[in-house]
Amino acid sequence: MPSSPDTSTLHNQLQHDGFAFATAEHMRDLLQAPSALSDWAVFAASWNDLAPDTYLATRGRYRRRRHAVFSADATGEIRREPHQPHYQSLNYNPLQGDIQRWFEPVHPTTADGTSLHRILAFSRELFGTLAPATRRWHIEVHQFRIEARADEAGEPTPEGVHRDGVDYVLVLLIDRSNIESGTTTIHAHDGTLLGSFTLTHALDAALVDDARVYHGVTAVTPLDPTKPAHRDVLVVTFKAAN
């Protein structure tokens, strides 16, 4: 595999602004696609087998997901950890905080595949340059599908503009089909809008310094209300576990 790609542009943007938008073309270079994403077709297709997010039953069943936990140490080794719940305090998630949410696990073929491991390795490389003293990372991986229907918009962030309670976040677009909107917004702590952009092409990415900025995504609606519509993203969060 070629030498590690130059992440200095994203490093500088995150350090200066607290967030960055990376185009699919830029991410292809950084992820060393297609060679390092050799199972991409299978990886992307795994979003067709996500489980309903039952914790949103009172707000509609427009969100499907799977979840996995990994760890990474200073040597760069990335390991999958035993399946465990996803937890956020009410300080970060006023809608579903202070509860242990058990989601269906990411399938082993997806978790062990080349695409996910390259994405995790890239994230560790980049976030490691921003926090060089961190010796060990707690990593959570979320596969999300947001569905939109004529009578019900899909809400990628039903908790609204928020922070995740981690150190860094990567949101990578996998696919969007027959939808409009889904605009990512970035905000200062006082609510001031700092930037906005829409992930429209597979591998478009949003990167966030979660301690410095808030983020949210506007609801998605179908372009053609007679056909299925969805937005698929991979969300990866890194939190120092020193």
Image (spheres, rainbow, N blue to C red):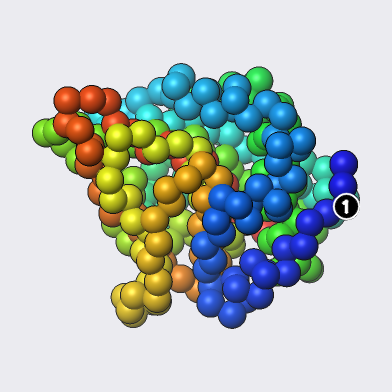
Question: As rendered, which of 80 and 22 lies closer to the eye?
Answer: 22
Question: As rendered, which of 177 and 146 lies closer to the eye?
Answer: 177
- Indicate the position of residue 214 as horizontal and vertical percent values: 41, 67
Under tag 1, what secondary structure?
loop
Residue, x 67% and y 70% (percent of image)? 9
Splitting the image into 4 quarters, where does residue 18 fall? bottom right
Q: Is residue 73 above or below residue 174?
A: below
Q: Estimate how packed mark 1 is, as few (under 14), some (14 to 19) or many (20 or more) residues with alpha carbons within 10 Å.
A: few
Residue, x 39% and y 38% (percent of image)? 176
- Indicate the position of residue 85 as horizontal and vertical percent values: 51, 36
Residue, x 52% and y 62% (percent of image)? 21
Q: Is residue 34 above or below residue 104?
A: below
Q: Is residue 180 above or below residue 163?
A: above
Splitting the image into 4 quarters, where does residue 194 fall? bottom left
Q: Is residue 32 visible?
A: yes
Q: Is residue 172 above or below residue 214?
A: above
Left/right placement of residue 200 relative to residue 84 reads left
Left/right placement of residue 19 relative to residue 51 reads right
- Indicate the position of residue 113 as horizontal and vertical percent values: 70, 27
User: Pointer 1: what residue?
Assistant: 3
Residue, x 34% and y 56% (percent of image)? 183
| Identity of the residue furthest to the left in this view | 151
Q: Amino acid at mark 1?
A: Ser
